[in-house]
Image (cartoon, rainbow, N blue to C red):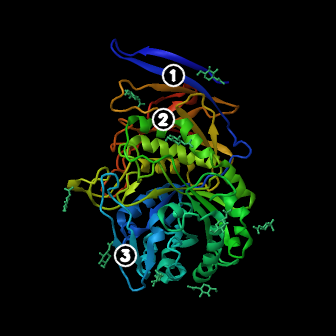
């Protein structure tokens, strides 16, 4: 039973505020087939050229560590870390190097922090994995783009050696997967292969590389470490293109090495915009476009799961171009990230790896002091110290909703409102929490903030009391100043600051959710 009414509340003689109401049915017990959701649903993909700036070089990057540890404090589980991406296919190896040797193109106003085009790394680069939090699971990419198997083999050997070293072992950091090449479907456009490079040729070349790389990395039928397959940017599903279906039908799983693929990764951005505006921000946040951006992968997930393999979005974020300025780096993007990750679990992705690079606009985390603007490359009059960006709050909220039970299940709620999305979480099969996202963009330029009143209707034996936490946001286009239940993560060391504020109300009262707000309900 869902009711919908529109009420005009004259809260003052001058301002009429628009308020909507909706009733949402909530199950008390997990519906059959509700998937479990991991505490590391929000995971990270890191552009590997500047990996040492993320992890730390001669000592741990405390700021980055703290951003990860905040999540561990909530879920008991670190985000998984994939290191690779574009620069993975431009990386060469020289064992002696402590530092990474990097050659960068000039910054431009649209790409203020370009990826290095030449990267040479040594053993120390891989050993920096020891600076990650205990129990972190790592996925590392090797160079396939340059078609030089020696480079891939040297990297794979160094990765194995690093993760077998006592420093990394003592740190409790584990390598789970090696990825061979990033977005190979784009090689024919970016000069890394000829223009007729196709999926059958890819499978042939991948399989040949995989023979050498598996040997070098110690990947076998009995090893813990396996291959991540795919990592394509394509989303066409076609058996004749770069899709999971294309890999399978060309027999990638038939070879000995192909059988070491246990997870398939695909990449996705909601579009590519090098400039942004309020309309673009609303498009990003919109419930229906988040769903249509993800349901396109449903056939791929089915094809992958039918092979008994795991499926992840191994590199994703809002908009390519390292994000759209004023869109990917603002509060509204936090609402996008939360709805996107939670909905990705509904289509069958186990984890969502949000892509991050030093100075990229769509980052959750900026782990280093920056001296030029991430938005237009202009010199900053005062350097910008390490900080979290608004989408980091999405990772915190998801962590709290999922909790540390280890068996949390999630279901999407039917909310008859084009702007409000809802999810419910179960522990031991029983309802614990619910998250609602009102993705109507309340911009600096918007005259009035609308709100929606949500009433909850429980099947039977529902809870009577609930705690409410809110992600407070001034405007969807704010770059800072968010608080989650009164707590800020925009601190010098990324540790939370401020008194937690929670409202306790009767379930029968329902709750209001403002435009551009997240509400989490915890049931007693
Ligand atoms: C959903 O809301 C619309 C109004 O926007 C209403 O016409 C419709 O009946 C509602 N649907 C259900 C299933 O309640
Ligand atoms: C890493 O450490 C070396 C040796 O101390 C130093 O030369 C280099 O600049 C550092 N690199 C980074 C990325 O911090
Ligand atoms: C790759 O494997 C082939 C076949 O075993 C071998 O001949 C070749 O030397 C290897 N290449 C490298 C760089 O290890
Ligand atoms: C292939 O990689 C190796 C190791 O990085 C390097 O020594 C060699 O010059 C590369 N070959 C080519 C053709 O670039
Ligand atoms: C794929 O590319 C290979 C090598 O260029 C070529 O021999 C083959 O015919 C192509 N296959 C298809 C289906 O186009
Ligand atoms: C791969 O193996 C499957 C199952 O044995 C077989 O049906 C398929 O034809 C093989 N594909 C290729 C391209 O060899
Ligand atoms: C993805 O979302 C964007 C808005 O962010 C929209 O423009 C685009 O059409 C969506 N793509 C799909 C496949 O739904
Ligand atoms: C920024 O500062 C650097 C030196 O710190 C200078 O070389 C460069 O020209 C400046 N760029 C702009 C756009 O002002
Ligand atoms: C919702 O927005 C209105 C108008 O900005 C504000 O007065 C109110 O405090 C907000 N409500 C909550 C619960 O944040």
State how far apart marks 3 and 1 are (Cα).
55 Å
Decide which of 306, 435 is in the foreground and name it.
306
Tell me the residue at 53%/75% (across/down): 147
x and y percent of residue 79 in the render? 51, 60
State how far apart marks 2 and 1 are (Cα).
14 Å
Of the four image quadrants, the one with ligand 2 is: bottom left
Mark 1 CB in 8 Å range of ligand 1? no
| Lower position in the chain sequence, tag 2 or tag 3 | 3
| Lower position in the chain sequence, tag 3 or tag 1 | 1
Give SS at disc 3.
loop
Query: Where the C terminus falls, by quadrant?
Result: top right
| Lower position in the chain sequence, tag 2 or tag 1 | 1
Residue 135 visible: no
x and y percent of residue 247 in the render? 67, 63
Residue 117 visible: yes
Give SS at disc 2.
loop
Decide which of 138, 295 is in the foreground and name it.
295
In the rendered structure, find residue 251 and report the number of the disc placed on it.
none
Q: Are marks 2 and 3 in contact (CB under 8 Å)?
A: no
The residue that disc 2 covers is 439
Tell me the residue at 62%/76% (across/down): 210
Mark 3 CB in 8 Å range of ligand 2? yes
Tell me the mark number nearer the camera, choosing from 3 and 1.
3
Tell me the residue at 71%/71% (across/down): 259
The residue that disc 1 covers is 20
The residue that disc 3 covers is 100
On the image, which quarter does residue 471 sit in? top left
On the image, which quarter does residue 200 sit in? bottom right
State how far apart marks 2 and 3 are (Cα).
41 Å
Tell me the mark number nearer the camera, choosing from 2 and 1.
2
x and y percent of residue 199 in the render? 64, 63
């Amino acid at each position: 039973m869902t009711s919908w009414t529109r009420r005009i509340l004259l809260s003052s003689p001058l301002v009429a505020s628009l308020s909507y109401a909706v009733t949402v049915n909530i199950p008390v017990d997990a519906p059959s087939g509700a998937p479990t959701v991991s505490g590391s649903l929000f995971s990270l993909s890191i552009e590997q050229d500047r990996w040492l700036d993320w992890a730390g070089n001669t000592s741990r990057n405390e700021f980055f560590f703290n951003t990860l540890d905040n999540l561990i404090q909530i879920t008991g589980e670190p985000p998984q870390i994939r290191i690779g991406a574009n620069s993975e296919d431009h990386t060469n190896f020289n064992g002696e190097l402590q530092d990474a040797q990097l050659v960068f193109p000039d910054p431009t106003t649209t790409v203020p922090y370009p990826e290095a085009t030449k990267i040479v790394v040594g053993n120390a680069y891989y050993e920096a994995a020891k600076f990650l939090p205990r129990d972190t699971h790592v996925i590392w990419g090797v160079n396939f783009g340059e078609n030089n198997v020696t480079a891939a083999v040297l990297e794979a050997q160094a990765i194995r050696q690093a993760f077998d070293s006592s420093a990394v072992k003592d740190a409790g950091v584990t390598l789970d997967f090696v990825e061979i090449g990033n977005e190979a479907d784009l090689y024919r456009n970016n000069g890394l292969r000829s223009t007729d490079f196709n999926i059958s040729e890819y499978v042939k070349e991948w399989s040949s590389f995989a023979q050498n790389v598996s040997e070098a990395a110690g990947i076998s039928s009995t090893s813990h470490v396996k291959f991540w397959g795919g990592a394509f940017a394509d989303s066409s599903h076609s058996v004749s293109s770069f899709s999971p279906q294309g890999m399978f039908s060309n027999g990638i799983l038939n070879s000995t090495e192909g059988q070491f693929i246990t997870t398939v990764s695909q990449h996705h951005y909601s579009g590519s915009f090098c400039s942004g505006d309020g309309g673009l921000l609303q498009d990003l946040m919109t419930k229906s476009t988040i769903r249509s951006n993800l349901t396109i992968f449903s056939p791929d997930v089915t094809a992958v799961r039918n092979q008994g393999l795991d499926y992840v979005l191994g590199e994703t974020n809002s908009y390519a171009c390292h994000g759209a300025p004023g869109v990917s780096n603002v509060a509204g993007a936090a609402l996008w990230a939360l709805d996107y990750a939670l909905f990705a679990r509904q289509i069958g992705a186990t984890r969502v790896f949000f892509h991050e690079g030093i100075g990229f606009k769509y980052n959750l985390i900026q782990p280093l002091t920056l001296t030029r603007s991430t938005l237009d490359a202009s010199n900053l009059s005062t350097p910008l110290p390490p900080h979290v960006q608004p989408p980091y709050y999405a990772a915190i909220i998801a962590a709290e909703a999922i909790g540390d039970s280890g068996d949390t299940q999630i279901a999407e709620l039917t909310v008859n409102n084009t702007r409000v999305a809802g999810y419910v979480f179960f522990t031991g099969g029983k309802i614990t929490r619910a998250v609602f996202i009102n993705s109507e963009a309340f911009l600096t330029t918007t005259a009035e903030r609308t709100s929606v009143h949500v009433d909850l209707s429980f099947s039977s034996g529902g809870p009577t009391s609930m705690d409410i936490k809110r992600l407070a946001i001034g405007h969807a286009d704010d770059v800072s100043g968010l608080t989650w239940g009164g707590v800020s993560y925009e601190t010098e060391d990324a540790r939370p600051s401020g008194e937690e504020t929670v409202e306790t109300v009767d379930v029968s009262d329902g709750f209001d959710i403002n435009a551009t707000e997240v509400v989490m309900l915890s049931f007693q």
